[in-house]
């Protein structure tokens, strides 16, 4: 996933012109790099009861940073996105279809996503005894699951603006989105540590039991700005 994200970003950066003034023109291929903030809504009542009972605290869900790189082909789009926050991290590849006409004031796309849902709460399994190889390591609890989802992504063409002139001009296209995610299988809780660093980093963990699974359904809403030149 990290390598694919890097390649798409590199492709977008190297292209001379990857974002037109707005998205309601007739360009056949448009690359957009978007950054923004989002908030996830998820009901983890069972897990929250477990943390309050054992640690006298609730794991708060904070806003996340979102990065999205996609390519728009008139009536279709395809891309990759990732959101990083505490305690959740989500990433996916997606593809979809335009819902509005090319000349609309709002360019809307309905996208199908498939990706990963991770949780990294700052708690530990109750009465867990570290294995010999875990002794002295910085241990972390993680939850991993695959998810599928639908999103409605909207570019506000009327709010588009541009800075600079000629080839040095940069265009900005703000927008908003709504995501629905569903985890068809039960995720796994693992407790362990990271070995190595950077792209060679690997999580070495053991599956742990007795911790409630997280909700299979979550909703996300966010705002972003698409950047191009």
Image (cartoon, helix red, strand yellow):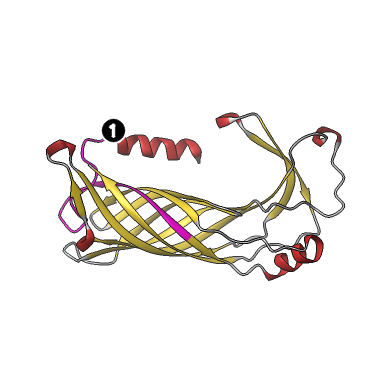
Bin the neighbour count of mark 1 within 10 Å (Cα to Cα): few under 14, some 14-19, many 20 and up. few
Q: Position of residue 203 (x, y in %)?
A: 67, 38
Of residues 202 and 175, the one drawn nearer to the viewer in this rendering: 175
Question: Relative to residue 99, is residue 174 depicted above or below?
Answer: above
Position of the C terminus, as image quadrant, is top left
Q: Position of residue 168 (x, y in %)?
A: 18, 37
Of residues 187 and 83, the one drawn nearer to the viewer in this rendering: 83
Q: Residue furthest front?
A: 56
Question: Relative to residue 185, is residue 46 depicted above or below?
Answer: below
- Residue 152 is at least partly visible in this image: no
Q: Identify the residue at image location x=83%, y=55%.
A: 126
Q: Identify the residue at image location x=70%, y=62%.
A: 213
Q: Identify the residue at image location x=51%, y=58%.
A: 63
> What residue range appears in magenta?
15-38
Tell me the element at label 1: helix
Q: Does the segment drawn in magenta span residue 52?
A: no
Is residue 68 shown left or right of residue 119? left
Q: Does the segment drawn in magenta span residue 31?
A: yes
Q: Residue furthest left?
A: 166
- Residue 104 is at least partly visible in this image: yes
Q: Position of residue 12 (x, y in %)?
A: 31, 39
Of residues 21 and 190, the one drawn nearer to the viewer in this rendering: 21
Magenta: main secondary structure equals loop
Question: Relative to residue 70, is residue 183 depicted above or below?
Answer: below
Of residues 70 and 52, the one drawn nearer to the viewer in this rendering: 52
Q: Position of residue 205 (x, y in %)?
A: 74, 41
Q: How many marks?
A: 1
What residue would you read off at disc 1? Answer: 14
């Amino acid at each position: 996933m990290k390598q694919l994200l890097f390649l798409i970003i590199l492709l977008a950066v190297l292209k001379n012109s990857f974002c037109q003034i707005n998205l309601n023109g007739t360009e056949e291929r448009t690359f957009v790099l978007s950054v923004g903030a989002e908030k996830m809504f998820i009901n983890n009542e069972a897990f929250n009861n477990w943390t309050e009972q054992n640690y006298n605290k609730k794991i708060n869900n904070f806003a996340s940073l979102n990065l999205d790189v996609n390519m728009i082909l008139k009536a279709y789009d395809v891309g990759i996105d990732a959101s990083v926050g505490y305690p959740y991290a989500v990433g996916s590849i997606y593809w979809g279809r335009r819902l509005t006409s090319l000349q609309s004031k709002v360019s809307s796309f309905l996208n199908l996503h498939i990706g990963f849902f991770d949780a990294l709460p700052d708690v530990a399994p109750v009465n867990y005894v570290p294995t010999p190889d875990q002794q002295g390591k910085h241990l972390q609890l993680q939850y991993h699951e695959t998810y599928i989802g639908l999103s409605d992504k909207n570019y506000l063409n009327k709010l588009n603006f541009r800075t600079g002139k000629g080839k040095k001009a940069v265009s900005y296209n703000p927008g908003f989105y709504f995501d629905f995610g569903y985890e068809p299988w039960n995720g796994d809780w693992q407790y362990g540590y990271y070995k190595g660093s950077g792209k060679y980093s690997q999580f070495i963990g053991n599956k742990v039991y007795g911790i409630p699974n997280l909700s299979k359904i979550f909703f996300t809403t966010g705002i972003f700005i698409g950047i191009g030149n």
